């Protein structure tokens, strides 16, 4: 079963923040920030699975956001004290 974030006991916490490279093409243009909103599934072990990209300020940031999210780890989502799968919208602000 998969739950929405509003159905959980509490929100999972980010415990592993991977390093990713800011897109060089955007850096050369003077861009200092990208925004991407992802729909992600966080499973019972805290692993992230990117379901889809909901919004992105530029395609260059989409790959960066997917890599960041896929390599991130959270505390497991919990419902009634048990680890569960949960679906989230994750807005990311990406900076060099």
Image (cartoon, grey):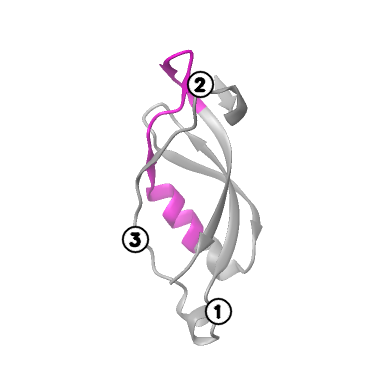
**Labelled pair 3, 2 in contact (Cβ < 8 Å):** no
Mark drawn on residue 9: 2
Image height of 92 relative to 21, above or below: above
Q: Earlier in the sequence, mark 2 or mark 1?
A: 2
Magenta range is 64-85
Q: CA distance from mark 3 to mark 2?
A: 29 Å
Local secondary structure at mark 3: loop
Local secondary structure at mark 2: loop
Left or right: 59 with respect to 94? right
The percent coordinates of residue 91 (x first, y second) are 58, 51
Mark drawn on residue 31: 1
Local secondary structure at mark 1: loop
Q: Earlier in the sequence, mark 3 or mark 1?
A: 3
Q: Residue at x 38, y 47 (%)?
A: 72
How many other residues sit within 10 Å of disc 1, few (<14), some (14-19) or many (≥20)? some
The percent coordinates of residue 34 (x first, y second) are 56, 67
Q: Nearer the viewer, mark 3 or mark 2?
A: 2
The quarter of the picture where the N terminus appears is top right
Q: Residue at x 37, y 49 (%)?
A: 71
Q: CA distance from mark 3 to mark 1?
A: 19 Å
| Residue 51: quadrant of the picture | top right
> What residue sits right under mark 3 in the picture?
19
Left or right: 70 with respect to 33? left
Q: Residue at x 53, y 29 (%)?
A: 86
Viewer-closest of 35 and 64: 35
The quarter of the picture where the C terminus appears is bottom left
Q: Is 66 in the magenta?
A: yes
The percent coordinates of residue 6 (x first, y second) are 61, 27
**Labelled pair 2, 1 in contact (Cβ < 8 Å):** no
Q: CA distance from mark 2 to mark 1?
A: 39 Å
């Amino acid at each position: 079963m998969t739950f929405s974030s509003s159905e959980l006991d509490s929100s999972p916490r980010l415990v592993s923040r991977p390093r990713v490279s800011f897109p060089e093409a955007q850096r050369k243009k003077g861009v200092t920030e990208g925004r991407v909103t992802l729909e992600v599934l966080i499973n019972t072990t805290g692993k992230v699975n990117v379901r889809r990209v909901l919004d992105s300020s530029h395609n260059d940031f989409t790959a960066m956001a997917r890599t960041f999210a896929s390599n991130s780890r959270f505390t497991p989502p919990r419902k009634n004290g048990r680890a569960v799968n949960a679906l989230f919208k994750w807005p990311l602000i990406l900076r060099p």
